[in-house]
Amino acid sequence: MELSKAFVKAKNPCADGFRWFLRHRPQGEDYQPLLDALVADGRVDDACWLLAQFGPTSAVLQLDELSCESIVFAGAIEVRGGIDAGARVRAGRGIRAGGDIRVGRELVAGETIAAGGVVEATTLEAGGDLLAGAAVIEGALRAGGQLRIARDLVCRRDLDVGAQASVGGVLVVEGEVRVARSLRVRGTLRAGGGVRAGDGVLVDGAIDCGSHLDAGWGIKAGGPITARGAIRAGESLCADGEIVAGAGYGVYAGLCVQREDWAGSARVVATERPAELLSGCWVGPAVLA
């Protein structure tokens, strides 16, 4: 793709960026070399803007290792080893690495981000899935598709997942947790804000939620369930421990089930009857399967 002066001007670029384009590429230039030139001149924001305006390509950058300050690539990035960037890594399509991905600031891909090892970044946005051995994200994390983390996931701000999410270890999120489908955690779940799953929530350990805990289907934990807000489940609510809502808030099961079906599909199981249980069928303590 060749970007002519008229083609770029039609996208209403900022005045400074367009002056740079006129000085450096007055006759137009192929898309990727122009992105490379912008990044080399320290104009990474302009390169990201250009990618957002003109979209991805089918090009694939294949490397053994990738070490740089920043890279903006219109296609897919495939690295057999690891990726280490001081500031930004952005791809119009997917980013895949056989080892770790460590980025000082932003890690952004239009499609899937996959790493055989640990992913570390300040912020992460994947248009598709996020697949990694473990992840530590100092800011917000957004995956438009599935999230699958083999071990622990730590996110210092909000976590947004467009499909189901699975974490093989501990899940710690200091902000909100929003998962469009099911949430599966094999360790404990701790969230500083609310937790919302469109389908069910299944956690092998305890759940500690800083605001409301919501699931369209059931909620099941292998430890106590504690929230600073309301606890609301569309179907059953089960904990191997206490179920405790925040002061002044209620505990609700069976919100998506007719009352005559509560005994089978809106069961509430815990070591003690929740003090603020307002809907559902209280069963009592039980050994969780």
Image (spheres, rainbow, N blue to C red):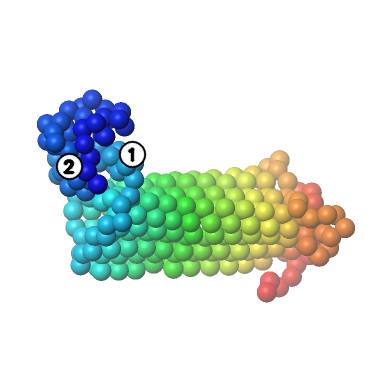
Would residue 104 be seen by someone viewing this image from the given angle? Answer: no
Amino acid marked by disc 2: Glu
Would residue 251 be seen by someone viewing this image from the given angle? Answer: yes
Q: Is residue 153 above or below residue 288?
A: above
Q: Is residue 196 above or below residue 13?
A: below
Q: Is residue 194 above or below residue 58?
A: above
Q: Which one is in front, 83 or 226?
A: 83
Name the residue: 44% across, 59% down: 129
Q: Which mark is residue 122?
A: none
* Residue 14 left/right relative to 177: left
Amino acid marked by disc 1: Gln
Quadrant where the image shows the C terminus: bottom right
Residue 6 on image: x %, y %: 24, 31
Q: Residues within 10 Å of mark 2 (few under 14, many from 20)?
A: some
Name the residue: 21% across, 29% down: 18
Residue 207 on image: x %, y %: 59, 58
Instruction: Single out the residue that lies furthest toward the right.
Output: 260
* Residue bearing the label numbered 1: 53
Tell me the SS state at disc 2.
Answer: strand
Q: Which mark is residue 29?
A: 2
* Residue 37 left/right relative to 269: left
Residue 17 on image: x %, y %: 21, 31
Q: CA distance from mark 2 to mark 1?
A: 16 Å
Q: Looking at the rendering, which quadrant does residue 15 occupy?
A: top left
Q: Are marks 2 and 1 in contact (CB under 8 Å)?
A: no
Name the residue: 26% across, 34% down: 8
